[in-house]
Amino acid sequence: MRIYSLLILIPFNLLISFNAFGQEQSMPDWIIGVWHNPYESNMYNFEFWSFSDGNISLQKGIPNKNQEKENLKDKFPGYEIKEESNDSIYKIHFTKELENIIYEFKIHKTNFSEEPLMTISYIENGNIKREHLISTLSLFRKL
C-alpha cells in the first residue's frame, strides 16, 4: 500500500511543479492598473506602465503630451511569450531562438508608504539592464 501511494504522489507532484514553473498564467490582480514613478524629478523620465488583461503598455515622458504607448507584446513579434506570477512577482519572458528577454515586476511593502510600491527589472540575454532597487527614483506607485 505504501509503494502504491508513493507511485500516485510522484506524478501528482510533477504535475504541480510543471504548472507552477512554465505554464502560461494570467496577470495577477495586484498588478492590474496604471503604475507611475512619481518620485522621479525629471519629468522626461516619467514612466507609466499600464497592465490590463493580456496587455502591457509603456508611456514615457511628460503626461498629456500625446505620448505614444508602446505595447510590450508588440515590441517582440514572433517571440514565444511565457508568464509567471505569484503574490508579489509578475514575470514575462520573451524568447526567440537564442534571445531571452525577461521583465519582472515586483511589489513591495515599505515602512515609508502605506500603499504597496512596485519595482521593475529587465534582463536581456542574461545581462541585467535594470534591477529591482528600493530607492525613490526606482519606485512605482499605482494611480
Image (tube, rainbow, N blue to C red):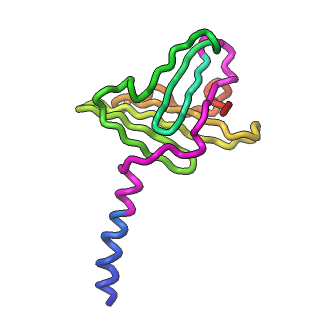
Residue found at x 29% / y 85%: 3
Q: Is residue 41 magenta?
A: yes
Apparent side of residue 132 relative to residue 134 in the rendered image (left or right) = left
Location of residue 129 in the rendering, given as x and y in whole percent from the top left corner: 45, 25
The image quadrant of residue 80 is top left
Look at the image and give the residue range highlighted in magenta: 16-45
The image quadrant of residue 30 is top right
Apparent side of residue 4 relative to residue 66 in the rendered image (left or right) = left
Image: 38 above or below 25: above
Give the total of numbered labels: 0
Q: Residue furthest left?
A: 97
Residue found at x 46% / y 46%: 26
The image quadrant of residue 97 is top left
Apparent side of residue 142 relative to residue 106 in the rendered image (left or right) = right
Apparent side of residue 85 relative to residue 31 in the rendered image (left or right) = left
Residue found at x 76% / y 37%: 112
Q: Residue furthest bottom?
A: 1
Location of residue 39 in the rendering, given as x and y in whole percent from the top left corner: 69, 23
- Quadrant, the N terminus: bottom left
Q: Is residue 126 magenta?
A: no
Location of residue 87 in the rendering, given as x and y in whole percent from the top left corner: 56, 50
- Quadrant, the C terminus: top right
For the residue pair 131 and 28, the one nearer the viewer reads as 28
Image: 103 above or below 46: below
